[in-house]
């Protein structure tokens, strides 16, 4: 659509909104909606369907897929992607919800999607699941992981993305540090220390320690590996954060801190990616994004990086990663296009061409979720995949058995408070109390425990 | 202004001039550096030592902003992402312009009429209004933003440029009122009375006599209002939702939260964002200084 | 204008979650209790005071100094005076971006220049070290608003009758004596007004800090405005945010009382 048109649209958007509302209510009044859910009949609606996604090319791919559906089934609609920066995901989402103007289709960090789900702000999508095919998911994954609550599914899987241990193999081999796949926490610490000492302008390892989502996710993986959790979903979601396991994880971060880049205390997604791609750090916890960036910006680094499942916790043997089971959810509020979004999503999920394109847009960051995508002959035809087959499959398949999430701790059950916890950066602040303010890990954990209890108390309605 | 020329301190005056130049440079340095960065190609951005004048001057950053370059890389080279923040830049520019224009217009209209009526007509409470306005000016926008936000939600105006216009009017009105009140107070009533005795209607008097005399004040208030509207971040951040409806201030911050930061692009956007203000400023700076002087120091 | 303020006060007595409006309920003084118990609130408060104090101090010193220098020079004075207001008209967003770029530890110009001159030997992490971050935001604030002080000072200086200076020179008073005995007293009134004014404004500034550091690293550059913002939106407790706002307004109120008294004093 012409950019000029959009300008006029923004100016008169209130009228637009009223117009759409009229259309919707007329449609409802005529009882059209129940009929359209039976078959993909054409829709006469016009307007822009706002689609939200993370920074990255894949959201746009999804929007294009949905536009392809719209071209033949709802020619008056256009799906438009908007990307939400990580720094402000929670704030922007909440502002938009409060303004009663959320996007019409959202793909966001799963803990946040699950918070919306528990708050009753999302449309159930069981009909979409049925049309996609319940048994299509890759082995080791269940539909619930993406978002099911009280018996209904609310999130359509988009992809899954764990963070793993990204390693510069040239540095590891040069210093004879062994096989990262066999490491435990002590080995990891030793490796970081050795690298920092032997390599002058390289930090041993890079983790996020800033007050942001990335820190939350990095810390959560370590906490889960040690066996700690925030909430006990089997016991009314009682807060069990204050535990020796959590303290152990926090202490480990403190031990790693001297071997991290100097600016680590304010680093987040961007900085950690940067540190690996520009060669400032030899190891990092990260999702697949560095491969794409290194492929474009720094072929030297690209040649040498590989990813492994995390180092095992010496006591428990766990190597949990934080996996963003990210999917598409549909806000109920002020959403005149619910049925169209559902149909478009169904089309897109069932189209292997688009599923592959989605995955290919950022290898190996976005892991395909349906079995048949992996077996499609087009699937391996991607330069990054071909260069890094083992690493890519680790991200895509091998990591699933160790996956965990703050919204589904150790995959024992969905926790609706996670989004709020992330919104308040409670985990990140706990980490910061130790790495910036030099608190003792035990005290920091006690503080975090109190914050989590406050969250649970304020939002107890969510679990009733 | 009293000028003083002392023959024996020619050296002193030259040195003063140099100091002045140095200070001006220091003040404008961030923008100068931004301009320099924006003209550098990507490869030169991180080269050491950084130079003020780029080795290779390139306009590609500006080009990308104006034509809308896709910000993300993609290894699947056959497929190009087509919707990234830089592509909305022109739209944001227009939004800022529209919002600034209308909020200034409305603010000036109301404050001019109000100030006029306060100084010319007698009614209760007229003495407090200027001081109350000044007080209103000092309330920081953070306190107002959320109540106003709730109002906008009620009215269904969120995500529309009108919400910003209303918001900015409410925060610029107090100061404009106060400034214009100070100006109007200085215009002698006798002029009007003379004209009205001659048979001119009040409106005619207002337009032909008062307005021209209050012109400096109106300009100063107008500039103030434009600056506030163009530069604001907080209101826009809270009131607006869709990416295409954002004004420049919030939009540009979106570049920063992506996959990697393209400093050349960001500096180019910084320069383009400041340019209208700078131009406006250069043209009208005398009035602004006069307005400030009058408003802030005089009674 | 009055309505939002009144509404803000009303909101401070309620528990408001904008996402679930059915849960809104009257909370009495609960919100105030919350903030006064919150360690972060007091950190923000202390930070705000620290920040305001040093910002205003530096703005005053530089502002007066600049005013004195500008007062002397001859040609192009009006041009320079106009140029001085430049920082004021630049959008805060732009200046925050520029400063983030310049303060970049590895490829920013500031670290590079300082290393060239030899003031520092290693890269300084301006925005990642808690103490430095505070000072970085102070410097930004000083950069932006010192000219404002200068303009006011300048306007006042230019109305001091030259005869006073001539008389003092004839009496044999040196430049420093002249400053303290003549200039400063004349400036005192204006300075008092400007200082109070700047203090009120600086105390409640949101954008300058938020856009540069988001209140980080950690929460070391949080001030009351940022605290209020975070509580309202990130924590979805608009009541608490509003309560913070009420506290801020209260402080503002006291400040403006002082201002008005000075104001009236000047009129007389």
Image (cartoon, coloured by chain):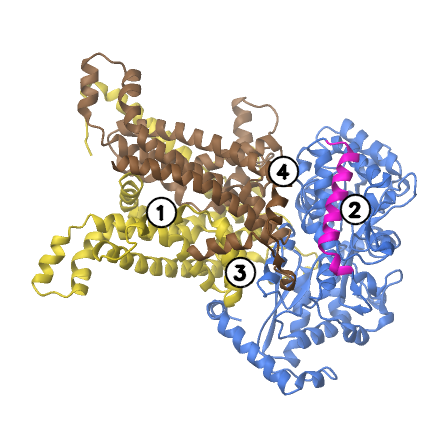
Chain colours: A blue, B yellow, C brown
Q: Magenta span: helix, strand or loop, mainly?
A: helix
Image position, residue C165 (x, y; %): 21, 21
Q: Which residues are magenta?
A: A439-463
Image position, residue C253 (x, y; %): 44, 42
Q: Residue furthest top?
A: C172
Tell me which corner region of the image, top left, top right, bottom left or bottom right, holds residue C101.
Answer: top right
Q: Are marks 2 and 1 in contact (CB under 8 Å)?
A: no
Asked if badges 4 and 2 are on one and the same chain, I answer: no
Q: Which mark is residue B134?
A: 1
- Which quadrant does the C terminus of chain C fall into? top left
The residue that disc 4 covers is C217
Left or right, C253 with reference to A78: left
Is A90 above or below relative to C141? Answer: below
Asked if badges 3 and 1 are on one and the same chain, I answer: yes
Q: Dot 2, crowdedness within 10 Å: few (<14), some or many (≥20)?
A: many
Q: Are marks 4 and 2 in contact (CB under 8 Å)?
A: no
Q: Which mark is residue B52?
A: none
Residue at 58% x, 78% y is A76
Q: CA distance from mark 3 to mark 1?
A: 25 Å
Q: Residue furthest bottom?
A: A30
The residue that disc 3 covers is B150
Please tell me whether mark 4 sits on a helix, a strand or a loop: loop
Image position, residue C189 (x, y; %): 31, 31
- Which quadrant does the N terminus of chain C fall into? bottom left
Is A147 part of what is drawn in magenta? no
């Amino acid at each position: 659509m012409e950019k000029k048109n959009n300008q006029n649209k923004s100016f008169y958007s209130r009228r637009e909104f009223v117009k759409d509302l009229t259309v919707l209510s007329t449609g409802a009044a005529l009882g059209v909606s129940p009929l359209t859910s039976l078959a993909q009949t054409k829709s006469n609606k016009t307007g822009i369907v706002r689609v939200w996604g993370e920074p990255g090319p894949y959201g746009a791919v999804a929007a294009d897929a949905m536009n392809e559906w719209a071209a033949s089934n709802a020619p008056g609609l256009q799906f438009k992607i908007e990307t939400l920066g990580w720094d402000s995901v929670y704030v922007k989402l909440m502002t938009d919800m409060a303004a009663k103007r959320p996007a019409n289709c959202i793909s966001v960090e799963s803990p946040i999607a699950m918070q919306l789900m528990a708050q009753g702000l999302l449309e159930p999508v069981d009909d979409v699941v049925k049309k996609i095919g319940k048994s299509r998911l890759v082995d080791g994954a269940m539909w619930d992981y993406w978002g099911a609550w009280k018996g209904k599914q609310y999130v359509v899987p988009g992809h899954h993305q764990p963070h793993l241990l990204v390693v510069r193999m040239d540095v590891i081999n040069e210093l004879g540090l062994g096989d990262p796949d066999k490491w435990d926490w002590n080995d990891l610490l030793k490796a970081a220390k050795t690298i920092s000492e032997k390599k002058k302008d390289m930090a041993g390892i890079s983790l996020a320690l800033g007050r942001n989502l990335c820190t939350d996710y990095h810390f959560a993986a370590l906490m889960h590996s040690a066996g700690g959790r925030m909430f006990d979903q089997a016991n009314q979601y009682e807060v069990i954060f204050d535990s020796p396991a959590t303290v152990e994880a926090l202490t480990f971060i403190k031990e790693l801190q001297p071997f991290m880049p100097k600016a680590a205390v304010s680093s987040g997604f961007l900085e950690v990616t940067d540190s690996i791609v520009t060669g400032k750090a030899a190891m990092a916890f990260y999702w697949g994004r560095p491969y794409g960036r290194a492929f474009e910006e720094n072929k030297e680094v690209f040649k040498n990086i590989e990813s492994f499942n995390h180092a095992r916790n010496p006591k428990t043997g766990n190597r949990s990663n934080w996996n963003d089971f990210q999917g598409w959810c549909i806000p109920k509020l002020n959403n005149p296009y619910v049925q169209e979004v559902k149909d478009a999503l169904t089309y897109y999920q069932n189209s292997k061409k688009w599923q592959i394109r989605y995955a290919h847009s950022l290898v190996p960051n976005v892991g395909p979720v349906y079995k048949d995508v992996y077996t499609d002959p087009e699937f391996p035809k991607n330069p990054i995949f071909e260069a890094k087959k083992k690493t890519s499959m680790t991200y895509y398949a091998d990591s699933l058995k160790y996956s965990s999430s703050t919204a589904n701790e150790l995959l024992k059950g969905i926790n609706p408070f996670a989004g709020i916890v992330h919104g308040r950066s409670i985990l990140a602040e706990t980490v910061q109390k130790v790495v910036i303010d030099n608190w003792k890990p035990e005290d920091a954990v006690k503080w975090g425990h109190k914050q989590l209890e406050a969250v649970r108390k304020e939002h107890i309605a969510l679990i009733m | 202004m009293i000028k003083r020329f002392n023959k024996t301190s020619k050296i002193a005056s030259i040195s003063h001039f140099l100091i002045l130049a140095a200070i001006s440079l220091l003040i404008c340095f961030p923008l100068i550096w931004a301009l320099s960065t924006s003209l550098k190609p990507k490869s030169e951005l991180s080269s050491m030592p950084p130079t003020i004048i780029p080795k290779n001057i390139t306009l590609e950053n500006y080009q990308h902003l104006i034509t809308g370059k896709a910000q993300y890389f993609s290894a699947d080279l056959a497929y190009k992402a087509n919707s990234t923040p830089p592509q909305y830049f022109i739209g944001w520019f227009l939004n800022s312009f529209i919002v600034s224009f209308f909020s200034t217009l409305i603010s000036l209209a109301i404050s001019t009429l109000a100030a006029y009526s306060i100084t010319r007509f007698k009614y209760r409470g007229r003495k407090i209004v200027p001081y109350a306005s000044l007080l209103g000016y000092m309330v920081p926008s953070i306190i107002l933003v959320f109540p106003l936000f709730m109002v906008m939600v009620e009215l269904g105006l969120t995500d529309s440029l009108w919400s910003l216009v209303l918001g900015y009017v409410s925060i610029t009105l107090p100061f404009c009122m106060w400034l214009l009140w100070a100006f109007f107070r200085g215009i002698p009533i006798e002029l009007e009375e003379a004209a009205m005795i001659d048979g001119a209607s009040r409106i005619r008097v207002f337009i032909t006599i008062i307005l021209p005399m209050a012109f400096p004040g109106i300009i100063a208030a107008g500039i103030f209002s434009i600056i506030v509207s163009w530069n604001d971040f907080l209101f826009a951040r809270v009131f607006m939702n869709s990416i295409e409806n954002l004004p420049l201030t919030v939009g540009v911050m979106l570049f920063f939260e992506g996959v990697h930061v393209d400093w050349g692009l960001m500096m180019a956007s910084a320069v383009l964002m400041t340019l209208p203000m700078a131009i406006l400023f250069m043209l009208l700076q005398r009035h602004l200084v006069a307005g400030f002087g009058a408003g802030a120091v005089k009674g | 204008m009055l309505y939002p303020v009144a509404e803000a006060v009303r909101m401070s007595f309620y528990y408001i979650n904008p996402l679930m409006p059915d849960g809104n309920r009257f909370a009495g003084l609960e919100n105030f209790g919350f903030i006064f118990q919150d360690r972060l609130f007091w950190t923000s408060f202390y930070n705000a005071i620290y920040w305001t104090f040093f910002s205003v101090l530096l703005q005053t010193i530089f502002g007066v100094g600049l005013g004195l220098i500008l007062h002397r020079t001859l040609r192009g004075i009006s041009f320079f005076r106009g140029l001085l207001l430049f920082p004021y008209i630049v959008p805060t967003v732009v200046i925050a971006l520029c400063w983030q770029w310049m303060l970049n530890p590895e490829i920013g110009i500031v670290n590079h220049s300082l290393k060239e001159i030899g003031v520092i030997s290693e890269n300084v992490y301006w925005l990642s070290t808690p103490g430095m971050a505070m000072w970085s935001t102070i410097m930004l604030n000083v950069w932006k608003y010192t000219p404002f002080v200068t303009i006011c000072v300048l306007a006042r200086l230019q109305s001091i009758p030259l005869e006073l200076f001539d008389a003092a020179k004839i009496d044999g008073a040196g430049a420093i004596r002249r400053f303290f005995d003549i200039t400063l007293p004349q400036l005192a009134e204006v300075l008092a007004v400007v200082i109070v004014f700047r203090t009120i404004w600086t105390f409640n500034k949101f954008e300058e800090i938020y856009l540069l550091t988001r209140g980080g690293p950690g929460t070391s550059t949080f001030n009351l405005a940022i605290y209020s913002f975070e509580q309202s939106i990130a924590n979805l407790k608009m009541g608490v945010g509003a309560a913070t706002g009420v506290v801020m307004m209260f402080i503002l109120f006291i400040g403006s009382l002082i201002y008005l008294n000075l104001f009236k004093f000047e009129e007389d």
